Image (cartoon, rainbow, N blue to C red):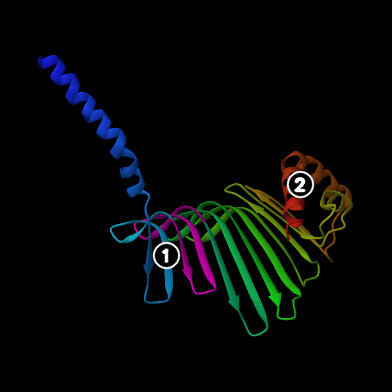
Amino acid sequence: MFRKMFICILGITLGLSAILSPHVAQAANEKTTLEYGNGATYYGETKNGKPHGNGTMTWGKTKTYKGSWAQGKRSGHGVYKVITRGEDSITESKYDGNWKNDKKDGKGKLHVNEIALTGYMLESRIQTGTFAKDQWIAGYDVRNGEYDPPYSFLYKDSKLRFEILGYAGDIWNDLKSGYIFSFTYKKGKVYKHIGVGEEYISKQFSSFIKSVEKEIKPHINQFEKLAKQL
């Protein structure tokens, strides 16, 4: 008799769990709208009255963040878009990557376009790699703008800093033929630099480029890919 009663109670308990569990999960993922005094609006998951989980914050028509939150701060992966209007231009910025305590932190990609009010592109820049405390610290920095030469290519990590000023399209062959504005390579005690107007022995420079080809060519290939996105 006790066994039958136990089985009956167990069956009722399991039945209630099956009925209630979906509602519990739904409550945990319930989305809320929060209004702030500075004109910002949040819609998404919350905890203790703060953004927590996944949600979107908008600051008027100029700033938007969509992604992960923790205790009211951007934390985890998210996309942040900002539009800033100056006297003669508009700057559009988009960061897609990791955040920590409301700052860019971890792997990510920042793309910034400065556009004249006439619609002409003044400068386009991509930084991709590692960020810390809102600053880009390692990876690739590629820029195209109203300069001579128009392109700037930079790669850096904890051991290597490698930079070229010149043109996109065939960077590797331009480098081998010396058709660049400047070249800088620094790794440990090894430092090599040439620039327009500086005297250098082309044979020695070609020999150096050949010695570091396996190391720098993958970075040059990445420069070309990023240049196409500008």
Q: Identity of the amino acid at label 2?
A: Asn
Span of residues in magenta = 55-78
In the image, is residue 88 above or below residue 2? below
Name the one closer to the observer, 199 or 181: 181
Give the residue drawn at x 60%, y 49%.
157
Identify the residue under disc 1. Answer: 42
Kindly identify the amino acid type of the residue bearing the numbered disc 1: Tyr
102 sits left or right of 14 in the view: right
Give the quarter of the image for residue 86: bottom right
Q: Which residue occupies 52% across, 66% down?
A: 64
The circle on residue 221 is: 2
Q: Nearer the viewer, mark 2 or mark 1?
A: 1
Q: Position of residue 217 (x, y in %)?
A: 76, 44
- Most foreground residue, 217 or 206: 217
**Residue 66 among those drawn in magenta:** yes
92 or 5: nearer the viewer: 5
Which of the two labelled residues, at mark 2 and mark 1, occupies the earlier sequence position? 1
